[in-house]
Structures are given as structure tokens and as C-alpha cells.
Image: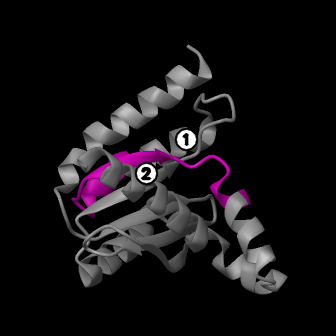
Amino acid sequence: MTCRAIIDAVIKTFDTDAAAFGAAGPLFGLDLGEKTIGVAVCDPDRRIAAPVDTIRRTKFTSDATQLAELAKERGVVGIVMGLPLNMDGTEGASAQRTRAFARNLPNVLDIPVAFWDERLSTVAMERDLIAIDTKRKKRAEKIDESAAAFILQGAIDRLRETSS
């Protein structure tokens, strides 16, 4: 399968899974790392994604419970999880961990999940934070939630594009 075919398959799967979100309501964007989970949210009309928080990972149940609390506070109706594909479009260990997290999420937080290709999201946000002269310590604190916002913005742009 070519890289383009893999990307097309990921987008088609996103479109199918995202249909469960309904037409409106806030969505979470998640950038799932080994040590942290970057969290972003969009407005109910799904126009703008904004960073929310970075959760320091401990155990799955604790992590998922924190996400559930944030989701309840913000009325979230769906989750867009960044899927860390390899540069050639294949799935490696990180993507498998992300899928496993998503499979277990309904045990704590029962809202629909869709995956969005997150390749280079952290790199893009690091570059943007450097461009606005953000200090290294502040970048380290904000990079994961900024990457989550980048992921979510791409996904909501796609949702608007397909609903037009």
C-alpha cells in the first residue's frame, strides 16, 4: 500500500468515526504521549481549537478519570485522538499504544473517538512557540496541549470541509 493510500484510508476512517460526534458540540483533541496527555478543546460550533491542559500520566484509570472530569466540565461530545503514524504512513508501537488507550477509554468515558494523523504536530507547534519567542521551560510546559490543539484544529477543519 502506498503512503497516499494509507493517508486516504486514515482520512476515510476518520470521516466514518467522526460521524458519531453529531453536527455540533465541543470536541477534545488529545496528544497521547508516554509521560503526558496534551488536551485541547474546540468551541461548540467547531471553529477554533484551543489548548486546555497537560495531564501527567500515571495509570490508565487515573488518566481516563481526569479526562472524564474535564470532558464533563466542558460538555465534550467526542474525542479526536492524534494517531502517531510513522513517516511512511505505517503504524508502529506508539500508534498501537494510542489505539489500546482508545479501546479502554469507554470503560471510564463513553463518548465517541476518532483518530487523526498527528505526524509532525509536535514539531510544528515547537516551531510556532519558538517563533513567538517562548522560553524553553514554557515551551516544555505547553508543547503537548499545543500539539493537541494543532491535531484538533486539523480535524475540525476536515469536519467543516466535509459538511459544506
Q: Residue at x 36, y 32 (%)?
A: 12
Q: Which residues are magenta?
A: 103-123
| Mark 2 burial class by Cα count in 10 Å: few <14, some 14-19, many 20+ | some
Identify residue for label 1: 95
Q: Residue at x 69, y 35 (%)?
A: 87
Where is residue 139? Give x, y as percent: 74, 79
Where is residue 118? Give x, y as percent: 57, 49
Alpha carbon distance from label 2 to label 1 = 10 Å
Q: Residue at x 53, y 75 (%)?
A: 55
Q: Secondary structure at mark 2?
A: helix
Identify residue for label 2: 101
Residue 112 counted in the magenta span: yes
Q: Amino acid at mark 1?
A: Ala
The quarter of the displayed image where residue 61 is located: bottom left
Between discs 2 and 1, the one toward the N terminus:
1
Q: Residue at x 61, y 30 (%)?
A: 89
Q: Is residue 20 above or below residue 77?
A: above
Q: Is residue 16 above or below residue 153?
A: above
Where is residue 36? Give x, y as percent: 59, 68
Q: Is residue 9 above or below residue 156?
A: above
Q: Which residue is the extreme one toward the front? A: 164
| Horizontal relation, residue 16 to residue 131: left or right | left
| Horizontal relation, residue 77 to residue 144: left or right | left
